Image (cartoon, grey):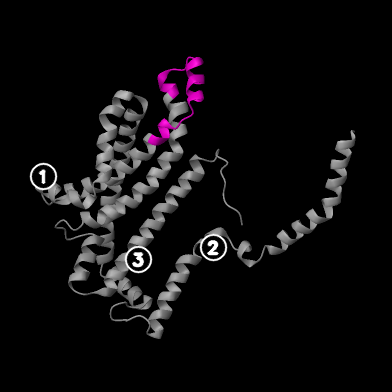
Amino acid sequence: MGRGQAVTVVAELSRAPELVEVADRAGRRKGLWELLPRPLRRLMGPALILAAWTIGSGTGLLNTDLFPPPAHVAATAWRLLGDGQLATHVGASGVRVLTGTVLGILIGVVLAVAAGLTRTGEDLLDWTMQILKAVPNFALTPLLIIWMGIGEGPKIVLITTGVAIAIYINTYSGIRGVDRQLVEMAQTLEARRTTLVTQVILPGALPNFLVGLRLGLSSAWLSLIFAEMINTTEGIGYLMSRAQTNLQFDVSLLVIVIYAVAGLLSYTLVRVLERLLLSWRNGFEGVS
């Protein structure tokens, strides 16, 4: 061992008590919060909002006529659930979102693959999709009514369009972001084009696709608000519109809660898919 190495070893040994002390302090910092399960910790934010809402209503900080307390909203939900209205409206909205989401995913993936794999596809599709991305969904509503009438068609198209754009933008970016060296290596090994696409390009674009799915599901629920303003008698958007007309603030708040829960469930679904499909990825998960 040389003199320089010996000096380094001595310095590290001299720091050993200091390192042990730092480790002990880090261990002592682990309190009750770190001991709670992650799902319970994630619920703390919504629980604090609910608590603030309850306290504000109970102390008079919130006008209960305009901002009914949670207990009143829960009673309204129970009443609508009992007479079947809530299940009818939520079921109708769920079918529309599911249909539009499935169609949007299929269309978005097909267009992204076509534009991502070939320059001709990019030239034909990319600018068109970027233009559609810049157009708000509600701006399409009057045109869709003129073109398609007031049936289910415009509603499904609005939702499908929002989802397809989110899926396309992110999946296309993921395809073009695949490491060129991986593609060249597969080509060097004389891999077939289908193998190159299914084994190299699409797996590499999968993280971006899941980001697009997360944004697409959010877009689906936002599009539903505008979609169900198109001459309908079923759906949570219709329930909201009727509540606003009749000044039923408890029903309006209930619909907002339903949208929030639906968005949270959609987010949870994508997180589960990420854990299943991206188990190979060792990404940064934050510090405690």
Which numbered disc, 2 or 1, marks the residue that appears first in the sequence?
2
Q: Which residue is mark 1?
A: 147
Report the residue at 86% width, 50% height from top.
14
Report the residue at 9% width, 48% height from top.
146
Report the residue at 90% width, 36% height from top.
3
User: CA–CA distance between discs 2 and 3?
Assistant: 20 Å
Residue 78 point in image, percent of width and height: 32, 72
Tell me if residue 203 comes above or below residue 249 in the rendering: above
Q: Are marks 3 and 1 in contact (CB under 8 Å)?
A: no
Tell me if residue 13 comes above or below residue 180 in the rendering: below
Residue 136 point in image, percent of width and height: 24, 50
Which circle marks residue 41 in the picture?
2
Q: Amino acid at mark 2?
A: Arg
Q: Amino acid at mark 1?
A: Trp
Residue 50 point in image, percent of width and height: 43, 72
- Quarter of the figure that contains the N terminus: top right
Q: Is residue 18 left or right of residue 211?
A: right
Q: Which residue is mark 3?
A: 257
Q: Is residue 138 left or right of residue 115?
A: left
Element on which disc 3 rests: helix
Which numbered disc, 2 or 3, marks the residue that appears first in the sequence?
2
